[in-house]
Every structure is written in C-alpha cells, then in structure tokens.
Amino acid sequence: MSSRVETTTDIRFLAIVVFVVGAASLGTEIAAARLLAPYFGASTIVWANIIGVVLVALAVGYWLGGRFADRHPSLRGLCAIVMLAAVLLAFVPFAARPFLGVSIDALASIEAGAFLGSLLGVLVLVSVPVMLLGAAAPYALRLAVTDVERSGEVAGRLYAISTGGSLVGTMLAALFLIPFAGTQRTFLTFAVALGVVGSLGLGPRFLVVPALLGALTLLTVGAIKGAGDGHVLFETETPYQYARVVEHAGGERVLELNEGQAVHSVYEPGSYLTGNYWDGFLVLPFAASGPPPRRVLMLGSAAGTVARAYGHFFPGTWFDAVEIDGELTTIGRRYFDLRNPRMQTYTEDARPFLATDDRRYDVIMVDAYRQPYVPFYLVTREFFGRVREHLAVGGSVIVNVGHPEGNDDLERVVGRTMAAVFPVVRRDPIEPLNTLLTASVGPVSAASLRDARGSLPPELRRLGNEVAGEIGPRLPGGEIYTDDRAPVEWLVDLSILGYANEK
C-alpha cells in the first residue's frame, strides 16, 4: 500500500484535517473545564488536572498514531481515527453525568477519596477521544511527507495549521459556543466537525454519522444536577460559571454556583433577614462606627441578599455593589427581589474595580470567596492595602471567610494578612461554616456595637446584641499571603481533606 499523498487536493485535505483536529483538541479542553465546574469548581487545581490529562492523552496519541501510521499509511485509516474520536467526543457530556452524580454524593459526605476518584473517572472519559485526536497529527504528517528533503517544510506547515486550529477552537469554545450554546452542544459541535471531516475521507455513506451527531444537539439539556428537597426554578451557564436558583418548601430560594456546596444568596419571602451570615453585614459596621454608614461597597454581591436588606433597613445608605458576573445581578432582580433605589451595580472584578475607583467608603464588604475555592488575589496583603486606601475615616472592612466546620486554617491566614495592613482585626464566628472578620484603622469592639443600639432599626437590635456577644480577637497563627505567593487552593484543599479524615 502506498504511503504517499500525491495530489494537491489530498494535501489540502490533510491541512483541513489537522486544523479541525487542533480546534477540537483545545475546544475539548475548555469544554471539559465547564463540564466539571458545576461539581468541582474551577480552581487552578482542577485546571491542572484537566491540562495534565489532556497533555498525557495527546502524548500517548502522538506515539500510537506514529506507530500506526507507519504500519497502515492510508487516508482512510486517518479518517477512521478522526471519526471514532468524533463519536466518543459526542458521548462525553452524556456519559459524564452518571460519574459526576457519584461525585456529588461523595463530596456531600466529604469522602475525599471517592471525590477524587470520580474526578479522575470523568477525566479519563475525556482523555480517550483526546488521545485519538493526538494520534491524527503524526498520521497526517506521515501521509503528507512525500520527499525527505522537504520533510521539515511539510512538518512545519502542518504544525502551524494545527496550532492555528487550536487557537480557533479555544476562542470559539470560550467566547461563543459555551456562552451561547452551552457545554453539551459545545462538545457536539466539535464532534460534528470531526465527523464531517472523517466522512469526507471514508466516503459519502459515512455522512450519516455527523448527521446523527448533529441531531443530538436538538436534545433538551435539562437540569444538570438534582435539587435535593427543592426544585430548580432556573439554571444557566454564565460566561464565568454554572448558576442555578433552587426553591425549597415555604418559598425560600437559594443561589448555587458551580459545585453547589455553598449558597451564595438567599431570599426568604416576607423577610429581609436570612438567619445566616449575611445578617452580620447589617450590624457589624456599628462595632467600628456609631451612626449608620453613608456609603457601602460590597465586593461580590451575587444576587444581592445584603444589598436588598440595606435598602430596607438603611434607606439613607448608598450601596455600591460589585459583581464580576453580571448574570447574577439579573438573577437577583428576577428571583431574589433585589430592589434598592440607592444602589449602583458594577459588573467588574473586585480587584480591578478598586484599582480604578477613587471613592471612599464607610464600609467595604468582601463576599467574593467562591467556596470551596478562593481567588488568590483577594486574600493578599496588596489587596487589603488597596481596600484600606478606599476607607473613609473611621471606616471598616468586613470579610466573609467560609470554611469546613471546625477548620480555621483559612481564617487564620486571612486574619494574619489583614493584620499586616490594619492595626485592629476582630472576628465573629457567626455560623459553623462562616466567620466574619472585621478590621479598621480605628477601634472595633463589642462595646461600640452595644452603644450603637439606638442607631439600629428595632428589627436588628436583638441581632446586634447577639453579634456583640460573639466578637473577639482574631485567631493567632497563619501566614501573610502576598500577590507573589498565596497558595490558597492548596490550603483549602488540605483543610477539606483534613476534615474528611476526621470523619
């Protein structure tokens, strides 16, 4: 059997094959991250797992593809590999859900071994089609090289075309397919493209395969995860994350993001109080200052639980709400009764917002730590230094630190880092899974909060007394995190594993 590709048409076809394969390889990597995010989050550790598995799969594919190409150098053999990769790629989003369902149960019970095992299982599902895509590259090169003297030129051209395809696949997946079509249809789109290319080399009758794969895009995606004892009112994939609204008996609504292990906003019908840590943001400012704050900044407002409460209890306070994901603000207005006539919303990341904003605030609240993973650049000395620059005289900062029950590693680090910037740091262990850290240049004390009782609305005075009884000095220990070194992902993962071992 001849190993040569003699015609210009065949050489151009090989260029098309490597371009589409390159696009599908990187597009699959981006889509795999979105597939995992609702269950495991989108930390650098999760990304490292995905990138590592993809690289290993590609490496194995390169090796196997090269060997197979030498033994069976034919265009049909290459297209058969591409077609098989297309079918398996389309299978991934449907096959992954049973694996991830196991992962939900494992994470809910903090069985870390099962959790990590399930994560590895779904990544193996992704690695198989990626390995086949890797095999296509050396196979195409073997067919394209007709003259040893020009092998370098041919190889360079195909590598350039493949890299161009990878760039297109990355941008297409991240900027268009995932935001507008969703993760499932992103996988299917790349599968259809691969199927079309494969069928062109195998013969017209194989066009039925991409046609069937295309038909799968018409299937309703449905709820990604079950809602426990509630039901899903709304779910969406935003440009940043998976988000859903779950309504429980009695009308309570909660906003869940990504893996859903933490609730990011709450709506209680007929009430502006939640019975949870959000209520602490209403009274803790009075531990540093007597009168109600005139201007408040909240970094990480989600669907606006605190903003809504401020509009009710402190109608004279101006509330600036910063949320990187504008879809959450829209969800707040639609499902969480987010109404505050003295509120301005900003769809920006917290750190860049502070870098460009020149206003000063009586209170700056930070609730942007997405559990179980935390943006490292919001836990550093430089970040809190920027926060201090935006505080008015007598102002304070309040940070919500979520953590596994009984574990205070993250709290110690955040408290120590805040203390490197502020002379006074106090803690309120308001919930078993949440601690509010408050800091200021001036005094912060339970006595100040008790003295401010007259400034609190009647509905908040009992809460003020409870919080005053909880305020204490920050926990000792921890290290100071900086922009250069802030291993917060490792800290959080180790604390989860430590909690798992105790169980």
Image (spheres, helix red, strand yellow):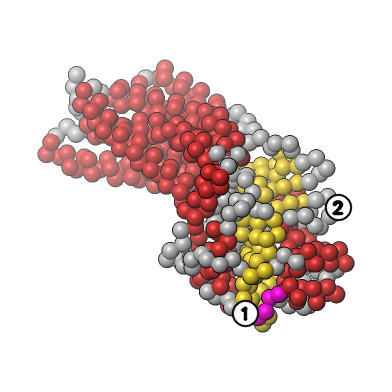
Q: Nearer the viewer, residue 223 or 22?
A: 223
Mark 1 and mark 2: span between their CA atoms? Answer: 37 Å
Q: Position of residue 160 (x, y in %)?
A: 29, 45
- The residue under the point 88% across, 67% down is 458
Span of residues in magenta:
441-445
324 over 169 or under it: above or below = below
Q: Amino acid at mark 1?
A: Val
Q: Quadrant of the N terminus?
A: top left
Q: Earlier in the sequence, mark 1 or mark 2?
A: 2
Query: What is the quadrant of residue 469 in the picture?
Result: bottom right
- The residue under the point 31% across, 26% down is 78
Please tell me whether mark 1 sits on a helix, a strand or a loop.
loop
The residue to which callout 2 is attached is: 270
Q: Position of residue 5 (x, y in %)?
A: 22, 28
Q: Is residue 58 visible?
A: yes
Residue 178: mark: none
The residue to which callout 1 is attached is: 441
Q: Position of residue 441 (x, y in %)?
A: 62, 79
Please say whether residue 185 is one of the residues in the magenta stretch: no
Magenta segment main secondary structure = loop
Q: Is residue 133 visible?
A: no
Query: What is the quadrant of residue 450 in the picture?
Result: bottom right
